[in-house]
């Protein structure tokens, strides 16, 4: 069975919004001073182990505007990896190599996990 790996940047006082500052929100960009070379290496290493990038509508919309124009190893991987977007307000098709999870997102994720496990077992 696949794992869901959660990667969240949050301050000690609970600010989560727009850590990279790409959406121009009130508290956006707060993570920059804390996101050095070592953090970037860890983020890339974690992303390289992923089969999908799972996100919600707001993250998808923000990332789909910012990342396709970025360059470098992290941007290359993020742009190439399939995205799964959990949303009840979006309608497809989506750009940026993204697929909308319709209806019950958890059920759809579970089904994808089972299909992946079956594929792996049939190759052995």
Image: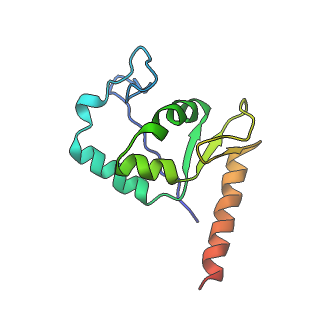
Q: Is residue 65 above or below residue 124?
A: above
Q: Is residue 123 above or below residue 93?
A: below
Q: Residue at x 57, y 29 (%)?
A: 58
Q: Residue at x 66, y 53 (%)?
A: 109
The quarter of the rendered structure image containing the C terminus is bottom right
Q: Residue at x 27, y 44 (%)?
A: 39
| Res. 93 image quadrant | top right
Residue 61: x, y in percent?
57, 31
Number of numbered discs on residues = 0
Residue 66: x, y in percent?
47, 33
Residue 92: x, y in percent?
74, 39
Q: Is residue 29 left or right of residue 79?
A: left
Q: Residue at x 41, y 58 (%)?
A: 48
Q: Nearer the viewer, residue 99 or 67?
A: 67
Among all residues in the image, which is located at the extreme bottom?
124
Residue 111: x, y in percent?
71, 59
| Res. 40 image quadrant | top left
The quarter of the rendered structure image containing the N terminus is bottom right
């Amino acid at each position: 069975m696949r794992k869901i790996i959660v990667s969240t940047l949050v301050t000690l006082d609970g600010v989560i919004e727009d850590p990279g500052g790409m959406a121009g929100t009130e508290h956006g960009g707060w993570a920059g001073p804390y996101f050095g070379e070592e953090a970037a290496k860890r983020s890339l290493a974690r992303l390289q182990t992923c089969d999908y990038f799972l996100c919600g509508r707001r993250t998808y919309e923000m990332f789909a505007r910012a990342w396709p124009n970025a360059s470098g190893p992290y941007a290359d991987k993020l742009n190439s990896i399939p995205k799964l977007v959990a949303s009840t307000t979006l309608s497809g098709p989506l750009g940026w190599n993204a697929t909308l999870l319709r209806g019950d997102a958890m059920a759809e994720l579970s089904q994808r996990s089972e299909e992946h496990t079956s594929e792996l077992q049939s190759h052995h």
